[in-house]
Image (cartoon, rainbow, N blue to C red):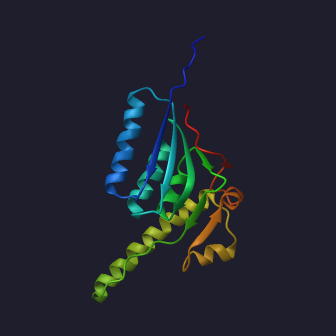
Amino acid sequence: MEQTITKEAYATFSGQINEDSTKRLFEALAQATQNNVTHIHLLLESYGGFVGDGIALYNLFKSSPLELVVYNAGSVQSIAAIAYLGAKVRKVSAHGAFMLHSAAMGQTVTSGAVLEAVSKCIAVDNARIRAILREYVTLTVEQWQALDYMDLHFSAEESVANGIAQEIGEFLPPK
């Protein structure tokens, strides 16, 4: 009988979800795979960032052959919460919190044609975000409606009850 050896790695990420940070996370997971790591514990702390990059991380986390445990040890907001949902195992610190909201674009003065294009982009991003949320998260009708115009905040306990996190647990790398 062949014995499987578990090789664990611990990593942290704090900052904006953008092209550079997404690239670094892609490279880190690829390197871990090449180094025969089987389990990764990732502490994630982020106020969010760009929708496309967050959804790319969600897809990476979801399809990773590694046993990926992602921890929220402080605050995971906006598109970072969507990326977090892709992990096979999702833990939140007893003092962690989440924030969800719909996609938005900065305010600029522009032409009607550009506003129409921006509106379509936001609609596409919101459809992607909601599709991922519906896979994992249980919200009331009122909360789903509120996503159109306000931020929704969840404590650690509320995030477990709503399916964002699976359990309360702390990021504890070995000494």
Q: Residue 109 appears at what percent x and percent y?
A: 30, 88
Could you tell me if residue 152 is visible in this image? yes
Count the marks.
0
* Quarter residue 173 falls in: top right
The residue drawn where x is 51% and y is 47% is: 43
Does residue 63 appear to the left or right of 154 in the view shown?
A: left
The residue drawn where x is 60% and y is 78% is: 146
Q: Nearer the viewer, residue 134 or 101?
A: 101
Q: Residue 88 appears at what percent x and percent y?
A: 57, 44
Q: Does residue 167 lie above or below 148 as drawn? A: above
Q: Residue 161 appears at what percent x and percent y?
A: 72, 58
Question: Quarter of the image containing the C terminus?
Answer: top right
Could you tell me if residue 65 is visible in this image? no
Question: Quarter of the image containing the N terminus?
Answer: top right
* Quarter residue 26 falls in: top left
Q: Does residue 91 lie above or below 3 as drawn? A: below
Does residue 105 appear to the left or right of 68 in the view shown?
A: left
* Quarter residue 106 falls in: bottom left
Seen as rendered, the residue at the extreme front is: 175
Q: Does residue 32 lie above or below 168 as drawn? A: above
Q: Nearer the viewer, residue 57 or 91?
A: 91
Q: Residue 63 appears at what percent x and percent y?
A: 48, 43
